[in-house]
Image: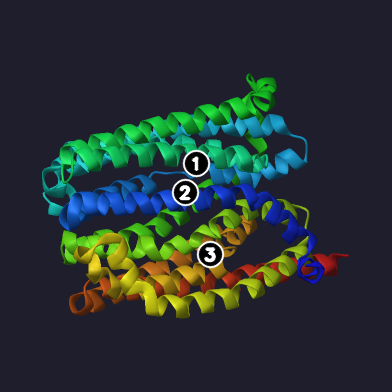
Amino acid sequence: MNRLLSFFDQETKRLAKNSSWVFLSNFYSTGLAFLRSVLIARGLGATLFGSYTLVVAFVGLVQEFLNLNLGTALIKFGAGYHTGNRNDKLFALVKVSMRLSGVMALLSVVVITLLTLFSDAELHRMQGMDAYVIAYAVAASITYFNSISRGMLRLYYRFRISSLIEMIMDTVETVVVGIVVFFFPKNIAVFFPAIIAVRFINAFICNFIAFLELKSEWKHYYNVDTEVLADDRRDIRGFVVGNSLGNTLKTVISQGDVLLLGILTSPEQVAYYAIAKKLAYAILTLTDPLASSIYPQLAKLLADRKFSEVTTMLGKITRFTVLPALGFFVIMYFLHRWMIVFLYGHEFSAAAASFMYFLAGALLGAVTFWTLPLVQSLGLVRMRIVAYLTTIIVGISLSWLLIPHFAAAGMAMALLITNVLNATIFIFFSFRSINLVSRSESTAL
């Protein structure tokens, strides 16, 4: 045990401590997410489940185009403000973020409404579910505020309360889904209103509990003037715009695949694809907590110019996760088809064709979970945009070639290739940036 503990440096141990509650929350949430996916898939059937997946992907993609991702900016700049004892600037940034989120949430609903009502594309009309699409967009727009609440909790290392919020929200959603699909199977007219109601309830839970938790910090700055940010507005604006565009492109990669598959195939193929993706990406339960915890930690380390601590921590984490990932891949190669049929039924057995491609991508993401937080902490927003644009072009080109021959599995192949390309670009340019800054500072000394 002592030898194992000695493998980790101080920053890695701190990351593990910060992530412990998030690990618990993610394991709990993943278990419930599995249960929900099984209930929904079995309760709706392949066709309705595919249509539901298309609605969620459509709304999510459009709203991401108008999402400023202000929770990330709060951590990026808030880390410096908090370290420098400038909490007045931090809470001024919170006030500005809340106002902007309200404007963008309203705008997103207007845009989705117009696209839904006035577009002749079958994809937008979602087989007559216009009212559900618009109502779901209203409920989902509140997540703009959730991002701010979660960002503040992470910045203050309140991982315990943040995790409890997630567990409560997942419990509420699972209970509602279970009741609806049990009493009203294959009834989209009951299922969608229930899901929309859950979105509103969970948004209230998230923001209200976060407000209570941080009230003692916030109460001294209720009347802070946002003009205190005047000197930083240009930097904040540049980061927010660049990071927002980067996140939008990331969502195009992660959600656009569903829409593209829906255009080129059928709701059933979308259902198979979604099932395989959700099941394979469950492995990220192990690393999502680390990604959430490591971002504020990296932001503070880089703000203090502790480059060697960053590279040491990331190197050891990566070496520690590679072998377990490879072993898990081999085991799942023999078990994945049986597991899909056991969980979702023979109706979804075709999902097995896509699963191993998704699993390879998920394991790559698990081993390199720190790449996006590192890019964000370094402020490499332009590089991130270029990387995403490159992978989107490559992904769309591959999809058009592969989907006609392999259907959902072809889209999964294309996504795996784009994930490998994206990770390679992020790692190369992140460490190049660290080395350049480190050398320039050493020369200056």
Query: Residue 178 at what x, y percent from top left?
Result: 30, 42
Question: Disc 3 versus disc 1: distance between alpha carbons?
Answer: 35 Å
Which residue reaches farthest top?
223
Query: Residue 221 at what x, y percent from top left?
Result: 67, 23
The quadrant where residue 13 appears: bottom right
Query: Residue 313 at what x, y percent from top left?
Result: 72, 66
Sequence-wise first label, 1 or 2: 2
The quadrant where residue 258 appears: bottom left
Question: Disc 1 versus disc 2: distance between alpha carbons?
Answer: 6 Å
Are the residues flagged by discs 1 and 2 in contact, CB closer than 8 Å? yes
Sequence-wise first label, 2 or 3: 2
User: In the picture shown, does residue 407 fall above or below 112?
Assistant: below
- In the structure shown, which secondary structural element does the residue marked by tag 3 occupy? helix
The quadrant where residue 316 appears: bottom right
Task: Pick the quarter of the image with the N terminus.
Answer: bottom right
Q: Nearer the viewer, residue 262 or 347?
A: 347
Q: Classify 10 Å Cα crowding around label 2: few (below 14), some (14-19), many (20 and above).
A: many
Question: Disc 2 versus disc 3: distance between alpha carbons?
Answer: 33 Å
Identify which amino acid the numbered label 1 is placed on. Answer: Met
The residue that mark 1 highlights is 167
Query: Residue 115 at what x, y percent from top left?
Result: 21, 44
Identify which amino acid the numbered label 2 is placed on. Answer: Ser
The residue that mark 2 highlights is 29
Q: Residue at x 23, y 71 (%)?
A: 350
